[in-house]
Amino acid sequence: MNADTRLSANFRLLAQGASTAAERSDLLFNAMLVLCGAMALGVCIAITLFAVRYRHGARVSRGRVGRQIGLEIGWTLVPLALFLGLYAWAAHDFVQIYRPPADALPVYVVAKQWMWKLQHRNGRREINELHVPLGQPVRLVMTSQDAIHSFFVPAFRLKQDVLPGRYTALWFTATQLGEFRLFCAEYCGSEHSQMLGRIVVMQPAEYSKWLGSGTEQPSLAQYGFARFRELGCSGCHAAGSSVHAPSLRGLLGRTVHLQDGRSLVADENYVRDSILLPKKDVLAGFEPVMPSFAGQVSEEDIQALIAYLRAGAEP
Amino acid sequence: MNYLENGHSLRSWLGSTDHKRIAILYALAISAFFFVGGAAATLIRLELATPAGDLVSHDTYNRLFTAHGVIMVWLFLIPSIPSVLGNFLVPLMIGARDLAFPRLNLLSWYLYIAGGLIILAALFLGGVDTGWTFYTPYSTMFSNSWVAVTLAGVFVTGFSSILTGLNFIVTVHTLRVPGLGWFKLPLFVWALYATSIILVLATPVLAITALLVVAERLWQIGVFDPAHGGDPLLFQHLFWFYSHPAVYIMVLPAMGVVSEIVPCFARQRIFGYRFMAYAILAIASIGFLVWGHHMFVSGQSLAASMVFSLLSFLVAIPSAIKVFNWTATLYKGAIHFDAPMLYALGFVGLFTIGGLTGLILASLSLDVHLTDTYFVVSHFHYIMVGGSVMAYFAGLHFWWPKVTGRMYSDTWARIAAVLIFLGFNFTFFPQYLLGVQGMPRRYHAYPPEFQVLNLFSSAGAVVLALGYLLPLAYLGWSLRAGRAAGANPFAATGLEWTTPSPPPTHNFEHLPQAPDEVYGYDPNASLPEPAE
């Protein structure tokens, strides 16, 4: 049985959700459906009722209708209150989508025309497939090599555009075992509709087995450490270096103060920009002497370097 | 002598500065583009009848949906009601002889035609494959198609919009007949006035954005491309700063048309006239501040998304008020179901569904799932086709006797109205379900579980196409053999009905009198028999 028929067999009109986000999303969606359905039905019933009752020729009392200011204010304020409530509900859920738990498993994603390349922390790589454990939060750190793409898993009710030149992130916790479709949802050229993949949700034990299988290879952080030395990063950033360069120990998540007075929390985008555009965010107290590594490092290299920095000094 | 008899040569039409003749020129041109855009849509629906991408290649498919979008948005919807009905009616409704700048009006038509021909040329040279949204860096760095030529056409067409908007604004301010105050204006004029302000303020941003994309494509200037230090999201902000208000360019005039028709056929004053006028202004102004709701998953900041979502909920309030007021206008009226009324009631129903699903999309967490799926495709077709096109047809049937001096077959017109309404729902309702299930838009081929609903949608499109072709026949027949309409066949209020049909070249034989009351209908008054 190929993947298509397997997935078709599970088809339902209201496809089942398979993530914690999907549970919240479906609850709100159903609530909105009831509310909007009631409003649409109300309008339709009123129009039909008036249309029949006040049709030309019917024997019924008619007359010019004057201003009804109370009614008008009423049907302005009642929807306003309802809408504000719905807004707050949706916004609350939305904020959760941007708050990954600290223990989320990182997976690094590079999108390109027309495929998904994914790397796990231990160095295992996949193309157009992502294996994840059931019930454990996973955080995707994503970038594109060319046009904008969008990582979309309908069963998770989640989607995030993947941009060239920066990282975007998406996290989820799968709640159902099985295989789920992965689509590219942002139009990206000729074979946009072929940029498909699948998410495979496994029992944690099976997942560990799967992760450990395959050819022996260095972990992402080990690979990052190797690149760190090969590219000469360690020449300046290692402790005891003669060049005055900031220490990178515990950098991710730290608040850094910049020369121009700004401060920001060092995240993946900050590291990426510092490697490719080192003059953009210069740390206070340091000279802007670092050269750009644009053209010398691939997107995968940068992600490995980030994994190395995240792992700490000893990968 | 009426305006149609004032010269029969080609030159007397192509060189005319009479707003009524220019309206006819626009009507012919947008009808042609409507059928070109419709042909592209037909091929799209044929391709999507089966999951495999077997009818056309993926590159052809991508060019088809781009052509459909570009033509329908810029060459049909945006000029439809404003340039055809607005051009014809605004001077008549305010008792003026013409627009404030008649020659500028003709220039607008030539700019529109020039832009349209450039876009058609790009189509015949091989087409564009970026989608009508031209997202960067795909459009600037990766697309191997006629992006720059198409954008040049859009750029030129934009100036037609700007000049038309300018013309309407000055006309409404300066040429109202004495005694016709702002709150005696028909809501159609209010709607066109608000639309004109959007045209003048938003279109220049589109022009600038188009130039930047072309410059980046030709010289890699690094505005949008991150490889050259640009920001692709900047493009999206600039594009939607125009293109969201553009939705209101399409829908406000539609609301104006419906606000004329519902009171006339309900024989009742429009309910809450002042609220209706204020709602138009509220939609036009808040509509400028909601563009970021197209970008909730684009990577824009959380704070920006929160603000854009809130404003999107707020802009729904004046729209809801309008729907309630049209409904309330029916109360205690004497309702006639002539063809224009059927189209107008169809508009109210479809616009309501389109608007309510808009609320679902404005909800931040739901948009994460639904954006860029067929839910969005269906939503904006309910607004733009179910709303704007339905209202354009309503207006076309309502003012047809005024424009041509002849009646059409009301029976056939009603059949077409019902057919379009049913065919439309049959085509687009399944697309909501496809979107909920997660089918992404702009897919040339799709997984097999989506086939049943796609097949429904394609079958519905056949009914819809039939509905759109019918008016060609019975309106064509009306031109040749329709009975004379008389000045006011629907016993409507409004200054345009006080002059003969078709109107004389200078619109009015005598200076018209401003009415005491706009929409002075009385449901108990007996209707005069229409003149034979």
Image (cartoon, coloured by chain):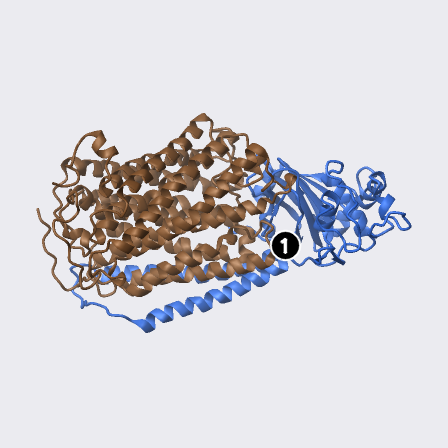
Identify the chain of the residue marked 1, using the numbered disc in the image: A
Residue ID at (71%, 42%): A118
Residue where numbered disc 1 is placed? A19
Residue A1, given in percent of the width and then of the height, sits at: 63, 36
Residue B477, given in percent of the width and then of the height, sits at: 18, 36
Residue found at the far left of this picture: B532
Q: Nearer the viewer, residue B160 or B290?
A: B160
Q: Nearer the viewer, residue A203 or B409?
A: B409
* Image side of residue B124 versus residue B301, left or right: left
Task: Give the drawing colour for chain A.
Answer: blue
Residue A269, given in percent of the width and then of the height, sits at: 70, 49
Q: Amino acid at mark 1?
A: Ser
Q: How many marks?
A: 1
Which one of the lettered chains is coloured brown?
Answer: B
* Circle 1 residues within 10 Å: few <14, some 14–19, many ≥20: many
Quadrant of residue A233 within the rendered picture: top right
Residue found at the far top of this picture: B125
* Image side of residue B387 versus residue A18, left or right: left
Q: Report the quarter where the N terminus of chain B lies.
A: top left
**Tag 1 secondary structure:** loop
Q: Nearer the viewer, residue A101 or B116?
A: B116
User: Above or below — where is B119 with respect to B452?
Assistant: above
Residue B428, given in percent of the width and then of the height, sits at: 41, 45
Q: Is residue B1 visible?
A: yes
